[in-house]
Image: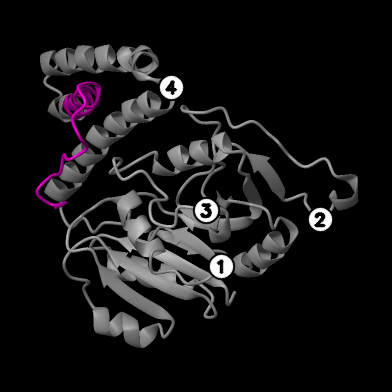
Amino acid sequence: MNDLSVIVVTYKTKKEILIKCLNSIEKKSRIIIIENSRNFNDKKYFLKKFKNLKIFCTNSNIGYGAGNNYGLTKVKTKYAMILNPDTICSKNFFKNLNNNINQIKDFHIIGCQNKQKQIPAGFFEKNENLSFKEKAKKNMLKNIEKVNWVKGFCLILNLKKFKNKKNFFDENFFLFLEEIDLCKKIIKNNGKIYFCKNLIVKHLGFKSSFVSNKEEERNLNNLKNWHYMWSSFYYFKKNYGFFNALFKMSGKLLSSFIKIIIFTFFFNFKKKEKYIYRFKGLLCSILGYPSKFRTKDFY
């Protein structure tokens, strides 16, 4: 698609994984890589291999939402596609995307199908089936559903529908729920979100950052656990108020604390560490601290 730019936010992503992702993007589309660090490894190699590619560095790890916001400021096309680097688009993805866009021109966001698994109803919002009922278009739109939210590993944005061209995602999030929060804002403003079953993407899941040893894997897990709980409380507080968020998440705070004690007693330090970071992330969010926790591998 000539009027599509694909944004791929990376953080020291493994070369082989990123090549597979970029190879699956059609040559007509523009590709913008946003590297969340000071240097992008193998820059000359990638620019030579992919003629439709531009690379920008943020100079620090600013997170998924902020990285994509920065990438969207570089987009000059009508549509933007946000794509995780640990994904591979299916063979007919862009052909199907073009057909779908021609059918649903009034969309704000289109979400895609993960080849690995179906998108679940979700812990955060019930994703009601709002499928089309138009008889004349029944066969044409059988792969398209109107929904409340979609997952963020692959999103297509209709940029003319967004008045604020600078901050699409809430940058208070570092990891998790940025896309759910964006969808919530769109629905509140009577926007339209669609899920297309024929836009199939293979999403490996948490392979975006290069992990070379067990210590780095441990640090990544700690980071995920801390931010998952921080983002969960922040999401509910932002959209439903502090006390509703506290009611929703208090059970997880107590559960994490109890599990810390149990796993300490049974000398299961791996499980203990998991719930320590979950407890800390949730407590920090409740107390109003920003999402600034990083491990030494993720500055």
In x, y percent, where is residue 243?
A: 35, 13
Quadrant position of residue 231: top left
Dots 1 and 3: beta carbons under 8 Å? no
Figure check: 106 above or below 73? above
Which comes before the other along the chain, label 1 or label 3?
Answer: 1
- Any magenta on residue 285? yes
Q: Which residue is mark 2?
A: 140
Are there few (<14), some (14-19), or many (20+) residues within 10 Å of tag 1? some
Q: Nearer the viewer, residue 185 or 156?
A: 185
| Three-letter code, disc 1 | Lys
Distance from label 2 to label 4 (Cα)?
Answer: 37 Å
Q: Which residue is mark 3?
A: 162
Are there few (<14), some (14-19), or many (20+) residues within 10 Å of tag 2? few
Residue that appears at 19% across and 47% down: 217
- Any magenta on residue 276? yes
| Three-letter code, disc 4 | Tyr
Q: Nearer the viewer, residue 293 or 74?
A: 74
Q: Secondary structure at mark 2?
A: loop
Figure check: 154 above or below 2? above
Q: Secondary structure at mark 1?
A: loop
Relative placement, left or right, of 103 versus 136 is left
Which comes before the other along the chain, label 1 or label 4?
Answer: 1
Dots 1 and 4: beta carbons under 8 Å? no
Q: What residue occupies the far front of the structure in this picture?
A: 163
Q: Which residue is mark 1?
A: 78
Q: Secondary structure at mark 4?
A: helix
Residue that appears at 39% across and 69% down: 74
Q: Which residue is mark 4?
A: 240
Residue that appears at 28% across and 71% down: 56
| The residue stretch that appears in magenta | 275-299
Which comes before the other along the chain, label 2 or label 1?
Answer: 1
